[in-house]
Image (spheres, helix red, strand yellow):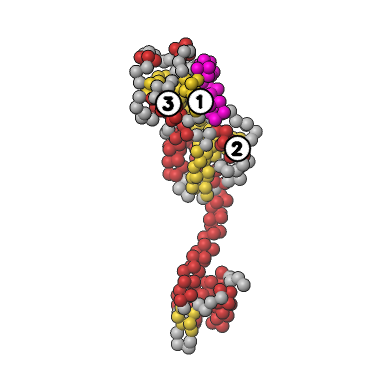
Amino acid sequence: MAFTLEQLRGFLAVAEELHFGRAATRLKMTQPPLSRQIQKLERAVGAQLLERDNRRVTLTAAGEVFLGEARRLLSLADTAPELARRVSSGSHGVVRIGFTAASTYGTLGRLLDEVERALPDIGLDLHEMVTREQVAALVNEEIDLGLARPPFDAETFGSRLLHREALLVAVPAGHRLAGLGRDAVADDLAAEPVVMHSPTQARYFYDLVVSMVPAASQNAVHTVSQVLTMLWLVAAGRGIAFVPGSAARLPIEGVEFIRLETPVPEPVELHLLWVRESRNPALGRVLDLLERSTGSF
């Protein structure tokens, strides 16, 4: 047998007033129906909640415990409609964000700060994954927003350029390339051993590097998916690596950076990515905010 919110409110009034008459007055009802409400509630709960006689009303031990839960349930019932309205409007909710490891070198933190400052009632749930994984997670509704590398299917996904940066060459400290005094060009790198991006796990960077330095894939001595791993291997003298400009923020001893001469000054792109048919109202609020502040990233 279930109890009703009306019965809970009746019990709360009696428990706080410890008097049926005053509780009935507070609820703008007469005493007999209030007494029947409490009796029905006790039957539904399966325990006596109140001790009553002609002189006083007191809570039983079970009633003391139930009072706290009754207050919690009534609070939830009172706030649930407003919360539902806020979620529906997008002013409250959760946005699940997928991000590449390299996007944490500055961009992700600034984006999170911006959203939390402007939309404090929207929670942000983070998931580190490569672009290929983000695409699958977006389609499967496991995340709402990605920080990913192009290209994307324009029919399925909406996207917006979030950040551009240079492509750097990471070299071991003291390497001859560090003494060039200029940007490196493909001919400077033709004979260098390369710690290369994975053609499956880091396809964007693999294709970008090969388009700039065709010999890079042929000279690969190691193939990895994470920029941080590349830099540690460079520090160990295993080869050079091609990394986004933001990687220079990582203070790894034994690694120096030089700029790679490229047809486009900042060829490395990071995009916001989302499914056009997303059903999460909070996502629209976040996208509107980032549309206005994209320049700060």
Q: Are marks 3 and 1 in contact (CB under 8 Å)?
A: no
Q: Which mark is residue 233?
A: 3
- In the image, which residues are magenta? 198-219
Q: Earlier in the sequence, mark 2 or mark 3?
A: 2
Q: Under tag 3, what secondary structure?
A: helix
Q: Is residue 211 magenta?
A: yes
Label 2, label 3: how many angstroms apart (C-alpha)? Answer: 30 Å
Residue at the bottom extreme, as displayed? 54
Residues 65 and 86: in front is 65
Q: Which tag, 3 or 1, sits closer to the chain's start?
A: 1
Instruction: Indicate which disc residue 73 carries.
Output: none
Residue name at image x 62 percent, y 42 percent: 140
Q: Residues within 10 Å of mark 1 (few under 14, many from 20)?
A: some
The residue under the point 39% across, 15% down is 177
The residue to which callout 2 is attached is 136
- The spot of residue 76 in percent (x, y) is 52, 62
Residue 85 shows in the view? yes
- Pointer 2 or 1: first along the chain: 2
Q: Quadrant of the C terminus?
A: top left
Give the SS element for disc 2: helix
Which residue is disc 1 drawn over? Answer: 223
Q: Can I make out residue 26 in this image?
A: no
Q: Nearer the viewer, mark 2 or mark 3?
A: 3
Kindly identify the residue that appears in the image at 48 percent across and 87 percent down.
53
Above or below: residue 32 compared with residue 168: below
Instruction: Calculate the distance from the C-alpha at mark 3 to the C-alpha at mark 1.
Output: 11 Å
Tell me: residue 24, above or below residue 133: below
